[in-house]
Image (cartoon, grey):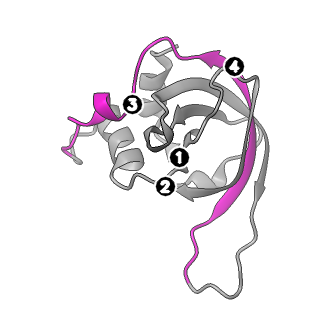
Amino acid sequence: MAYAVKAQIEDPRAETFIFAAQKTMYGGKHIAEGDIVFLFAGENEGGQGLVARGVVTSSEAIPRRPDLERQTPRVSVSIRRAALATGRLGRDELRRFKDWNDGRPETELNFKFYRQATNKIVGISEEAATFLEGFF
């Protein structure tokens, strides 16, 4: 399975990215060493959307806190950059894909990233991963 991370990314050209205690959704908690990851610089922090593709070099689940009844799973990951995006793909490009049942990879990404605009790690379908490969 491939994954996508939407987070604050200061330097999209960095060789390594480290994300500590990131929120996970849509299967993102299963991210593991060797997995392919597409990196999106979050627009809420001034980013532009898709910036890079990488490979997970380490992954560690954050233990749940016993004092919280409901808690979103979190994970810390390190990612080695493999490629920089050559095309633009962000909130503006995905905004028009709103028919949640159309099966399009653009709609899947819009739903998972922008329906709830928080930064997160998400699992993505093979179709979405293939679509994203077209930006490299």
Q: Nearer the viewer, residue 28 or 18?
A: 18
For the residues labelled 1 and 4, the Cα–Cα distance comes to: 19 Å
Q: Secondary structure at mark 3?
A: loop
Residue drawn 38% across the image and 56% down it: 116
CA separation in Å, label 1 and label 3 = 17 Å
Q: What is the C-alpha distance between the residues marked 2 and 3?
A: 19 Å
Disc 4 and disc 3: Cα gap in Å? 20 Å
Cα separation, mark 2 vs mark 1, equals: 6 Å
For marks 2 and 3, give the one nearer the viewer: 3
Q: Do labels 1 and 4 touch, CB within 8 Å?
A: no
Place of residue 128 in the rendered image (x, y in percent of width and height, measured from the top left): 43, 32
Residue type at mark 3: give it: Gly
Q: Which mark is residue 5?
A: none
Q: Is residue 41 above or below residue 22?
A: above
Which numbered disc, 1 or 3, marks the residue that appears first in the sequence? 3
Disc nearer the start of the sequence (4/3) = 4
Q: Is residue 72 above or below residue 39?
A: below
Using a 10 Å C-alpha cutoff, classify the residue at mark 2 as few (fewer than 14 neighbours), some (14 to 19) or many (20 or more): few
The residue labelled by disc 1 is 123
Amino acid found under the numbered disc labelled 2: Tyr
The earlier-in-sequence mark between 1 and 4 is 4
Three-letter code for the amino acid on which mark 4 is drawn: Ala
The residue under the point 54% across, 24% down is 51
- Amino acid type of the residue tagged 1 in the rendering: Gly
User: Which residue position holds label 4?
Assistant: 82
Residue hosting label 2:
26
Stretch of the chain drawn in magenta: 70-99
Which percent across, then down, holds residue 99? 18, 44
